[in-house]
Each structure stands twice: as C-alpha cells, then as structure tokens.
Amino acid sequence: HCQTICPSGFTEEGDIHNSTCKLCPSWGCRRECVGGKIDSVATAEQFRGCTHIKGKLEISLRTSGGNTLSVLESALGEIKEIEGSLQVTRSYPLVSLMFLKKLEKIIGVSTAEHKGQVLHIINNKNLELLWDWSKGRTINITGGTLYIHSNPKLCYNQLLPLKNMTSNPRSNFTELEVSQESNGYQASCLPDVLKLRVWELRRTAVVLTWNMYCPEDMRKLLGYSIYYIAAEKNVTLYDQRDACTDTWNVLDMTIDEARNGTRDELPPPETNKTSMILNPCSNMQPSFYPVTPLVPFTRYAAYVKTYTTMQDRRGAQSSIIYFKTLPGAPSPPTSVTVELRTPYSVSIKWAPPTMPNGTIILYHVEVHANSYNKPKILAGNINYCGKPNALANMIKASLEEAPETQEEKTTGDVKNGSCACNEESKSSTRFTSRAEEERMESINFENDVQNQVYKKADRPKSKTMANRIKRSLDISLSSMLVKLTENRDPRPGFNYSNSTDEDGYVKSLYYELDGKTESLTVDSMRHFTWYTVNIWACRARADNETKERYDDTWCSERAYYTFRTSELPNADVVNNFKAEIVKSNKTFPDVNLKWDPPANPNGFVVAYNVHYSRVEDSNQGQDVGLGTCIISDDFETAKHTHTLRALSPGNYSVRVTPITVSGAGNVSNDVYVFIPERAVESGYEWAWGLAGGGVVMLALLGGGVWYARRGLMSPNEISKLFPSVNPEYESTVYVPDEWEVPRANIEFIRELGQGSFGMVYEGRAKNIEKGKPETRCAVKTVNEHATDRERIEFLNEASVMKAFDTFHVVRLLGVVSRGQPTLVIMELMEFGDLKTYLRSHRPDADSSLPKKDAAGDPPTLQNILQMAIEIADGMAYLSAKKFVHRDLAARNCMVAGDLTVKVGDFGMTRDIYETDYYRKGTKGLLPVRWMSPESLKDGVFSSNSDVWSYGVVLWEMATLAMQPYQGLSNEQVVRYVVEGGVMERPEHCPDRLYELMRQCWSHRAAARPSFLRLVTDLAPHAHAHFRHRSFFHSPQGQEMYALQRSALGNYHLTTRYRYKLKLL
C-alpha cells in the first residue's frame, strides 16, 4: 500500500505527484527538516526520518501516552545533526535522552533568545540520564555553551563527560552553565555497588541475594527495590523506559523486612535502636528475596538498588545480572483441527504451544473411540420416527456442554486479547488447575526458601485438584448421550499398545511424534462414530533438573478435539424383508413382518419406521398411509419381527425405514400383502335365503292385520291422538354410572374463569386415570342458584362427551353428580378457548388479556395450518360417530399447554359469548354468523353444515378472532348468507387458506369437502407427531376415508349417468 513517508534507510525521490522511496547508500541518506517544538507524541511524528535539523529543536512534553520513549525513538531516532540548538524543558515523562540514539553533533547558532546556549536542559523532574557514556558515546557540541539546571534526579556526575565534548574543553563547569546544587538533589548520585547474584533457581521463581548496604546512618536507609524484566538480549537501565511507562517489574523490600529476614535473633527493642546507631554495620547478613511468579525457561535481567531518604546523596545499586529459569510444563498445543477425508479416514493438525517452557522434543497423540450411551438414548421419551435428526442434534449439543472445557493457557496478564496492567488483571485472575499448580509450586518454593533462610511455618495439608476433577467428570459423563473415553497423562518410557474393535476399526491409537511434526493422518476408523484426539507437548530435560521434577512437568496439559467421522452412504438399510398373513379365525387378520437389522449402520439403530398403505386397484396409486414406530430394543426382544394387526381387506404395500443415530436411513423395497374378503362358508346359503323370506312374510301379514282392523274402526277412533314426549325435550333424571367420581378425590387449585353454568376451576383429581395417582384437570361447576332442570341439563350436555375418545376432542374425565355442587371433570386445556388465545396474540392486544405463551407473537401460517388440521381431525371423529356439533366456532375449540387445539365444550360456552348468538323469532339462541345457508333457511343441521362453520373458524384464525361479517346486523347476516353471500378474503390471508374457506362455503351442501378430505389436504403441512395422534391415521379413520372415497366415486358415476339420461 502507499506510504506518505519513506521508512528508515530510504530517501524520497521524485515530485509531489510521482515520488518513490530509494534505498540510501552505505553512508546514509540526508534529509533536512526545519526545527520546531515537540509538545506531544503526535508532533514528534512530523520529524520522522529527519537526519539534519535546521534551527532550534525544542522538546517540552507535559503528558504521556503508552510507552512514550518507544514512540520518540521511532520518530526522532534518525537525527544525526542539529544546526541551531537542542532545548529540553519541563518534559515530565522523560527519564533519559537515549531516544536521540544517532545524535552526533550540535552546531550552535547564536540568537538573541538563547545568547549562545546550544544545549538547554531545565526543569525536567524525572530526567535521570542524558546518554549512556559508558559505551563510548560522544556528542560534538560547538558554537555555544551549556545551560543545565533544576533537574532533581539528574546527577552532576552524569554531566561531567560533557566537559570534553564542547568546542572549549574545561576542567569544570561554571555555576551559570551547570548547577551542582539544583541538579540531582533528589537522587543517590554517589552509589556504592551492591553485589547481586542468584542463590537458587526454579521453574517459576528465583531467589536473589546481595550484600546489605551499610550507610553512615542506617536510619536513612528505607529499603531495597528489586527490578526485573524478561530479556532475550542484554538491556540497559533506560531502554524503552519513561516516567509514566516502566517496563521493569519492581518489588520493594523494607528495611524492617530485611533485618527480620536476615538475622536469627534480634536484640530487645530498647537496645536495638541504640546498637544500630553505635554499631550500624555490625552483624550484617546477606539479603535474600524470592522473586515470583516467573515464566519457565525464560531469560531475565535484574538489578537491585537502595531506597533512601532525600538527605542521603549516596545510596547503592547493583549492576544488571542475567539468569534463565528452569524448564516447566509446556502449555498445551494450539489450533487442534480435524479434517474429515472419508468415512474411515481423518487428518489431524495442530500448532506448537504458545509457551513451550523448554525445548519440545515430541508430541504424544492418542485417538480414542467414544461409545454411545445407548440406555440413556433409548430411555428418552422421543419420537425418533417423527424427528429422525433429533438425536444427532442432541448429541452435538451435549458434547458442546462437555464437563471438561479447554481454556487457552497464558502466562502473562491478558485482557480482551491485549496486555493489561497488573493492577487491572489481578482482580480478574482465574484459578484454573494450571494456575493452582503454579501457585502451589510457588508456595512450596517459598517454604523451601524459608526453611533454609527463614523459619518455616506449619501449614495444613490440602487435597489435590485431580481427585475433585475426576469426581466431577464421573458425575457429568453418566448423564451424557456419548460416553467419552477416560484419558491419562503420558508416562516417560511407557510402552503403549494400540487396539481395535471386533470389526477391525480403531478403538485406541497411540503415537509419539517428533517435536517438529504438526499433522497426522489416521485410517481404519469406524464411520459415524465420535472420536477424541488428545495431544500433549513434551519437552527435553534440562541439565540441572532432577528426575522427579522432570517427570512431573515433562508434558503439557492435553489439548483435545472431539469429532465425529463421516456418514457412510447406504449403510442404514434393512435386509431380508418379508411379510406373511397370520392364519386365524379373526375377522380382520394380522400380518407378520420380519427383517434383519442393518449389518453395519451409522452408529446404531434406535428405531424402525414401518409404513403401510392401501394400494388402489384403479390407478395403482398409493392411498394415505399409516405408520408405526418400533424402538430397536422392542424389535430385538420380538426376535426381529413385528405384527400389523386387524387389517381390513385390500392390497397393502409395506416398507421399513431404519432410524439410526445419523437420522432416517434408506427405505426398503415395498413388500405387497393382499388380504381377501372373508367369504361366507358354503352350505349355509339356503339358511340365509329362508330367513330372509320369513321376514318378508311376517311383514306382509302384519300389514294386512293392521289394514283390516282399521277398516272396522269408527271415524272417532281413527282420529284419536296418542301424544308422546319429544325425547330432546323430555326432562329425565341423571343416573350415575361408571363415570362417577368421589367428591373427596377432587381438589380445587385456582379459578380459571366463568363458564356457562358456573365457575371453572383448575383442579387436581386423584386416581381418575389409570396408572396416575394425580391428574391436573379442569373442574366445571353449576351456579348455586341453578334449578334442578339446569343441573340435569348441565350433566346431560357433559354426558355427550362420554362417547368420545380421540386425541383432538377434549376428554371427559369424570362426573360428580351426588351432592352439591354438581361437578364435571374435564381434560385441562391450559390456554383456554381458541378465541381468547387468538385475541391475546394480536399486535395491539388489550393489556388486560394475558399472553398465552412466552413469545406472544401472532401465530404464523404454519401454526394456523397445524391448528386447522387438528380441528378437522377432531370433527372427522365426531362425524364418524354420527354426531353433529351445530356450534363449531373458535370459542368452542380449546388450546392445550403444548398449543394443540381440540374440539370441545359442546354448547357449554354459550352464556360466556352471548353476543355471538341471535334469537330468531321464538326460537332459542342461534350462532347465525357461523351457520350454513340450509341451517338458517330450513333448520337443517348435518356434518356438511359443520364444515361451513369450520370455514368460518378458519376465517377467525386468519383475522385473530375478529367478528365474522363485520358491519352487518344479525338479520342482515341471515339474509346475506341465504342469498349466497360469503365473506371476503381477510387482509394478508394466503391463497391456500382462503381456498379452503371457499370450499367450505359452497352453497350446495353436498359440494363441500368432508372433514377427512380436509385432513388429507392439510396433511403435508402437519407436524410429524400428528400422524401418531390423529383419528385420520388410525385404522378406523382410514377405513372411513376409503368408504367415503368409494361413495364419492359412485356418486359421480350416478350423476354422469343421470345427466346422460336427461340428454336422451
């Protein structure tokens, strides 16, 4: 990319529009710049690459950014000559001027402002050093004088080498040039030398020792400061260092700590102070100080200096020493990845540890096959046939929540990917097992030091982390769907043996690879199997390291990766599939199915999906099929067989799909089974004919007797009436039956709302369902002021439901008719009626209507279609039972806790939604907005009229329970519907949904689809679990649907025949 400034060692050539950077010659490039003032790091960038400055270069830094010296060295490090003057004033961040690392000459140009002062250094309170004169550094200063004053930490002896670098060498400076009093008055300018050395070295610590400093007055010695830094190369005291950013770590040791730690016995306090004044240097022992924590196998620089009062102008300081910590356990290998090559082969790759802490000589790699927790998987209440991929998704989620997590191991303080100051990182230190190991090593190390130098304190023994981790893993793995193989840390010199399973696939593999190897290919792996690869980085042994310490830390913690091999295509298919009819005297025979499981499946088989359907003779097309799900354990228990029971006559096709861990497998070939009609046994035809003839003769004889008797009656007797009571209006007494429940078994929990006859409660019923000690239920009550007739009507309406037993019709659980109040126990539908549910999910719903589920969003088209097929299935069941609902509406459909919609209440909600009903003349209340034309006109109710109402329910779902025929009065609705009117398409209503409405609203009742036909149309949009719950997919439902299709075909044939007769 383009650069605006040429880098160091290059010079710019060309004009402003077309310039390039050219490599400088061996003697260097010359780039002249005009002097100026540097008051920030940003302004220093203006001088980047400059080698010669014309004029005054003034440096006055008031504030500092991150590592100011490093930035200044990068920007000003190329300056060789200043023709004018160098002025450094009030630069608080500066500790030295070593950032001007190539400065060789300052040529003074006398001005009125500076009066010949070529080097002007004043009021820099943290400046300690100009340049490192010990390395032979010189600067040629000509054409002017020096002016160096008021630098409290800049010692006078640091300025003395300048005497011989000016154009006028002299033996001493004048007080006007360099002040001996105002410079260095806060520094120890005549330091004695402390002899610093390493006393003991460990992996993460070092003990430094030095001779105690003995000033003339020990009271001026406050303590010692130990400075250390990681240094691959030799360093100086002021490299990359300023007053605000000190890259050196510092530890302070007070004089009291030094005294107490270096003397076995101290005199009494009264005599101690006196003896220290009279004999300040008596009985002085070397100082010892443990420096920890350090990074293993790292080179460090360190020095120590005294910390004295301002009155002491001497002090002491050691030279810089270097040491390297012992090797330690490497950090784990990084970037472990697995590439799936084939179902049997993978490629494993990794990267070296970020902290090798020694020389990596080998990688110990283990590959282990994990096993599926088959009892845990098969014990789950999951319909694997309906959700074939559910298991693979669950296993993936479980492994993501594996109990052992791999943390990136770092040895420095890292925060958000960048280095953080120690003060910020201390509060957020994480105590991992690795951190605890290092901490315990540090404690043991300090104990060893104190045992030899100080007095060791007794500490209680603590348990190791290994037992706690193992216990945690054992508990967590028992609840996982995949059992991870246990792993052990590698042992030096141990002989590992590979192993395979009974089919020759990899079970456990062990490798010890060269330290430069970073990849591995593994073959002969079992397809669709979970494996774990564990990788340890192991280091070489150091010369001064004991075998015990080496054995404990020679390898890193493991880096691991759990993966699953690829799926093997066409592996999940059953073999030797057969079907045969079981001979018996049953009306509808059984069919016995037999097949062999897949020989080498992906994972293992969890279930088998058996699908069978009737084959039409006319076009060989498949009818809507039935399915059953068989758990693999049940299949094994049945010795690889399964029985289809009570199949009605017809030609059937059967196929089997195995469901494995990977999902649905390959569908088997169809096997066809023909079940013939059951023939009447020969020899009895004459009996049936005789019986039929007898019945006809008796009917004729009875008719003749009645006619003769009528002819003998008088006219008055003939006209006499014999009144009878219409059974629909007959007041009967309710008789308790097997549905009666003891009142003591019913417990009320809370009110749910007002019903048509009284309050409805959520309750708890004991022993009302077989195998369940308690069942949540809805309890309907009768108002305490109700008449006996109303109570009987309440019980009779509830009794209608005794004949119903299907999933999509609300179930009656029991009745309490003895005593008061009368109770009806119903299946609990947690979300209430569908009308309220839909209204509560409007975007602008009234806040008084509670949201019925967590989301609270309007139902999606998929939700509406699912509700629609569930209502149609419930109505299909009622139609098969010859029951006409007469009041199908959203208010009479109930929503369960899992959002299943069921038909229910059968007239028991009329008083709650009284505005939905209309009294026509002297008749009772009628739901005219949901009624068909024939019902409004002639009072005819049938399953076809229920289909019309079903279309209105679809309209309610599409509009979130708006009132049908809005803007029309009830009288207008009656007239509008009778005359052939239907409602318009709701806003944003999909074509598919409105087409269903229009089919249901056909003016001719016979042209409307049946509920079974509606289920067929909606079946492609249904959830997988629908086929296992529905009436439609039951044998009775399929038989009913086949009869309807047959009748419909005969109807069309008859219609065409009549049409032809009319033409003739």
Image (tube, grey):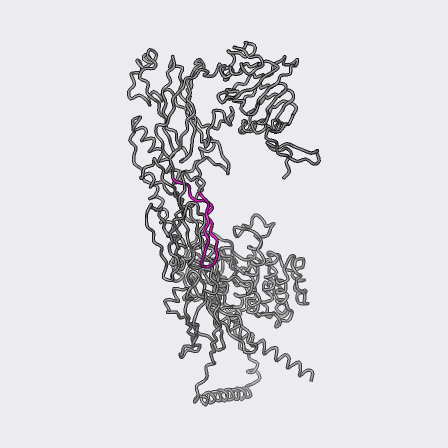
Position of 54 with respect to 706 (left or right) is right
Residue 332 magenta-highlighted = yes
Q: Nearer the viewer, residue 619 or 486?
A: 486
Residue 905 magenta-highlighted = no
Q: For the view shown, which residue lies furthest in the front direction?
A: 26
Residue 693: percent from left, percent from top:
49, 89
Position of 38 with respect to 534 (left or right) is right
Q: Is residue 774 above or below residue 935?
A: above
Position of 98 with respect to 970 (left or right) is left
Q: How many numbered marks, from 0 up?
A: 0
Position of 3 with respect to 624 (left or right) is right
- Magenta span dominant secondary structure: strand
Residue 284: percent from left, percent from top:
33, 18
Res 87 → quadrant: top right
Measuring 38% from the left and 13% from the top, which residue is drawn there?
217
Q: Is residue 383 above or below residue 298?
A: below
Measuring 39% from the left and 47% from the top, which residue is drawn there?
364
Residue 24: percent from left, percent from top:
61, 32
**Magenta stretch in the rendered image:** 329-352
Residue 280: percent from left, percent from top:
34, 14
Q: Nearer the viewer, residue 468 or 924?
A: 468
Measuring 65% from the left and 25% from the top, which residue is drawn there?
33
Measuring 65% from the left and 20% from the top, which residue is drawn there?
55
Q: Is residue 940 visible?
A: yes
Q: Nearer the viewer, residue 34 or 862?
A: 34
| Quadrant showing the C terminus | bottom right
Q: For the view shown, which residue lies furthest in the top direction?
A: 175
| Quadrant showing the N terminus | top right
